[in-house]
Amino acid sequence: MIQLRKLFNFVLFLPSLFFICLISGCISSSDQVFVSKNKVVLGEQYPNAHFDQEVMIVRISQMLIVGQLSKKERADLHFERGVLYDSLGLWGLARYDFTQALALQPKSPAIYNYLGLYLLLDGEYDSALEAFNAVLELDTNYEYTYLNRGLDFYYMERYNLAQNDLLKFYQANKNDPYRVLWLYLNELKFKPTEATQNLVERAKTLSTEYWGTYIVQYYLNQISVKDLLDKAKAFVDPQSSQYAEVLTETYFYLAKQKLNAGHIEEAETLFKLAMANQVYNFVEYRFALFELAKLKDASELTEQAVVQQMKFTQDSSNSKKN
C-alpha cells in the first residue's frame, strides 16, 4: 500500500533561499520562469483564509452533539462537515464523517464518490472501483465519478477502460480543458501516435474561461512557459486565492509532462510545488500527493534491488574465494 501519510512530512513552506536554490537546480532552464535561484512562484497564503470553514465546522459539531436530529439530518450534517474537512486537507476527519454519513444514509452517491476517491489515493484500486460502481448504480448521471473511475483505471494501467470513462466525462462538457488533458494523458499511454492529434482537435472547442485551456495551448507548443506565467498573472489577481489554484493546476500538469518525458527529479519538484499552494480539494493537489507517493515507492524498490544485487555480487565473490 502506498504510504501517503509519510509525504506530509516534507516542508510545504518555502522561505529559505537555500531551499529555493536547491529546487531550482532540479528544474530545466526552460521552466525556470516559475522557479529560479531568486524566486519560486507561489500563491499568497493568508492566516484567515479558512476562517469561514472553521466556523462552520464548529457550528455543525455543536449541532451534532446537542441537536435532536433525524437520521437524514444527522447524515447531511456529517456529510457537510466531511466536505469542509476535505477542503482543509483534513482527510482522515473527512473520511470519518463520510463513513458516519454512509451508515445513516446508505444510498447516497456523493458519499460513495468521496470514499472511493480516498480509497484510490490510498492505492486501494479494487475497493475504489467498487465504490465508484456503487455511485453509478445509484445515479448513472453522477458525472465526476466517470473521471474518478477513469483515474482509478488509469493508475491501474488499464488504459482502455480508463478511456471509456474519461471519454464519457469529456463528452458531457467539451469546453472543459481538464477533461481534455486527462484524455490526452491517458491516450499517451496506449495510443501515443494519436494522442497529440486528438488533443489538437479537442482544443478547438475549449473555452478561455478555464485556465486549463492555456495549459493545453502550452502542451501543443502554441505558447511558451513564460507566456503561461504572463497569462496566469492576467487571468487572475496574483494576490488572490484563485492564483494559488491556477498555480496548483499549472505545476501539476507541468510535472506530468516531465514525468512522461522521463525527467523524474524535475517532475518530483513540480509535484511538490503543486502541493505547496495548499489547494487541498483540487484534483491536481490530491494526485500530486499520490504521484509523489508512487515515485517514493518506486525509488525504495530500486534501492532495495540495488542492495540485493550488491549483496548477491559480494556473496558470489566470497564463494569463489573459498
Image: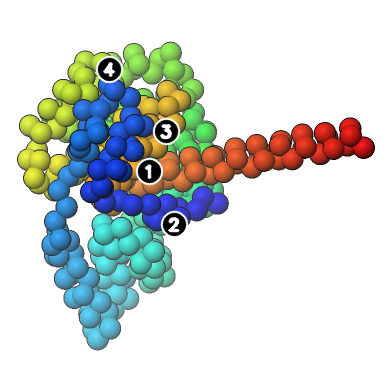
- Which element is circle 2 on? helix
Q: Amino acid at mark 3?
A: Glu
Tag in front: 2 or 4: 2
Residue drawn where x is 64% and y is 42% of the image = 304
Check if mark 3's residue and mark 2's residue have beta carbons within 8 Å. no
**Sequence-earlier tag: 2 or 4:** 2
Instruction: Find the distance from the CA under tag 1 to the CA under tag 2.
Output: 14 Å
The numbered disc on residue 287 is 1
Whole-percent x, y for residue 76 in the image: 27, 68
**Sequence-earlier tag: 3 or 2:** 2
Instruction: Find the distance from the CA under tag 3 to the CA under tag 4.
Output: 23 Å
Instruction: Find the distance from the CA under tag 3 to the CA under tag 2.
Output: 21 Å
Q: What residue does disc 4 label?
A: 220
Q: Amino acid at mark 1?
A: Phe
Residue found at the far right of this picture: 322
Check if mark 1's residue and mark 2's residue have beta carbons within 8 Å. no
Check if mark 3's residue and mark 4's residue have beta carbons within 8 Å. no
Tag in front: 3 or 1: 3
Q: What residue does disc 2 label?
A: 5
Q: Amino acid at mark 4?
A: Leu
Instruction: Find the distance from the CA under tag 1 to the CA under tag 4.
Output: 23 Å
Whole-percent x, y for residue 101 in the image: 36, 68
